[in-house]
Image (spheres, helix red, strand yellow):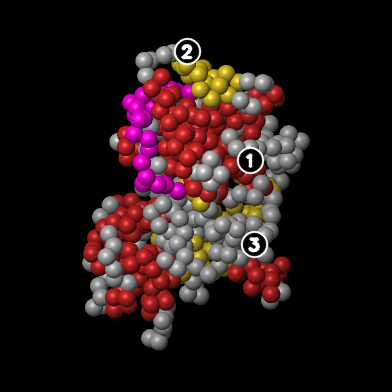
Amino acid sequence: MRDVYSKADHVFVWLGEEDGTIALAISSIHAIVAQCKEETQNFVKLVDIIWADKTYTYSDAGLPSVCDWEALYSFFSSPWHTRLWPIQEVCLAKEAICHRGQHTILWSKIALAARWMYHRKYWTIGNQRCRGLDCAAEVYHSSGGPNGLYEHLQLCPYFDATDPRDKIFGLLGLRPPSSPGAEGQSFAIVPNYQRMSLKDVYAAAARVAIAEGSFVVLKRATFLLPPPLDIPYPDTLQIGSFPSWVPRLDGSWDARRGSPMPIIARAGKSAGGDFRLRPVSLPDDADVLLLRGLVVTKVARTSKPLSYEVLDDPAEAANVIRHAWAIATEQYSASYDARGALIMFIFTLTSAGRNANGQMIYGDLAHEQRFAAFMLNHGGLDTQVDKVLSGFVADHDPKEFLGSLVETTMNRCYIIGNSGEQALGPIGVQVDDILVIILGADVPFILRPVENKWRLIGDAYVHGIMEGEYIEMMNIRGILDKNVLQFATI
């Protein structure tokens, strides 16, 4: 299939019959593309505007008033937009032309319009989300060139496939020949519907992703839940028992369990340094992932979790933050710099000081002011008890800080390590869990010892070691090699 679609002069896509709205939908798409072209200086600044640190950014600016939203929703409601197999068909094509009735439009324009609409929060205008439109926006990034398999795994939970193994098999055509998962390479994935269980396929994909240099799959493994039991999977499909490090790529995020955004390192920085690590299996157990890394500390204290239910009640969220702040202040002497400690606390609590769009904020006093407004408004901290807050008080909407908590801190806990490290970890973290740096990983992880192996608990933010500082210190002391451990993760 890779050869067929990449070598074809044109790929034609059939989206369905005429429904009376297609002409309005296509004219609306052209208007959106024209606006995107104008506002990105002929697309020169397109990447800078719609992505920052590889995370989505959003704009409150409007979309063209001439758009017919009912026609657009009808157009993107075609089942084709949510199917996984067509992704490689349009991504590999030299030129993909979409047909709807007697009308035609280039796929590249559809995808760009969808991504621009996503950037402009189209749902605030049309008052509803459209899954097909969101899927087209996701595929836009995959259309840009031959990325590794790990770049495409993020697509899996959003798209449909009758056999969930096809969520991997349907993406194999997008692998570059240099990928460890490509044919003839060390972790090559060869589709086999008779012998490979769902766990086998997803574990193989996770190994390839890590071997390519991405640990996003480990971040996703802890909060992607299996789909409902009534999903009609093939009767012959074997699911298998999933290890903690293998995500259910056929599942979805659950607001009761995981954070909507994984911990993200600062662009160009990595907690695990510049190491590149290829994972291997134990010869007798394919469910075990071997990784090398360093133990940073044990978890000594954890706050109450900022769960989905807690964040739904701002007053309760403020109380949980007060509890976390009490844990933090126990680590300092009477002469500590209260203002500096509070800034570090706020920075940790929102995973490196991220705002409601998930963007990192450096040296932005407004972030601390939003925190103060939120806490003072909802009674979690007050200027009489915590006088340092008075230096942050300003005229800010308390909802702004709550938005950053929902985006970056939902279902996470504030953590203190044995040596006083400030950290943010997953909702399931416990005292005596281990904070580790996996060599090559961009962020730290939390593991739990289980007999002579380890269970993955989730990703973490640890203040002061997110940019390779710990690795560098160990190197300077000449004890890096002596302290690198092998983690057999189950």
Which residue shows up at 48% across the image and 23% down it?
A: 80
Asked if residue 64 lies in the magenta stretch, the reply is yes
Percent coordinates x, y for residue 462 in the rendering:
50, 65
Q: Residue furthest right?
A: 184
Which residue shows up at 41% across the image and 63% down it?
A: 349
Residue annotated with mark 3? 273
**In screen coordinates, is 96 left or right of 339?**
right
Quadrant location of residue 146? top right
Regarding mark 2 in the picture, which secondary structure is present there?
loop
Residue annotated with mark 1? 147
**Picture disc at residue 31:** none
Regarding mark 1 in the picture, which secondary structure is present there?
loop
Between the C-alphas of marks 3 and 1, the distance is: 22 Å
Residue annotated with mark 2? 102
Note whether 299 is above or below 13 in the view shown: below
Q: Which residue range is magenta in the image?
A: 57-80
Percent coordinates x, y for residue 208 in the rendering:
65, 43
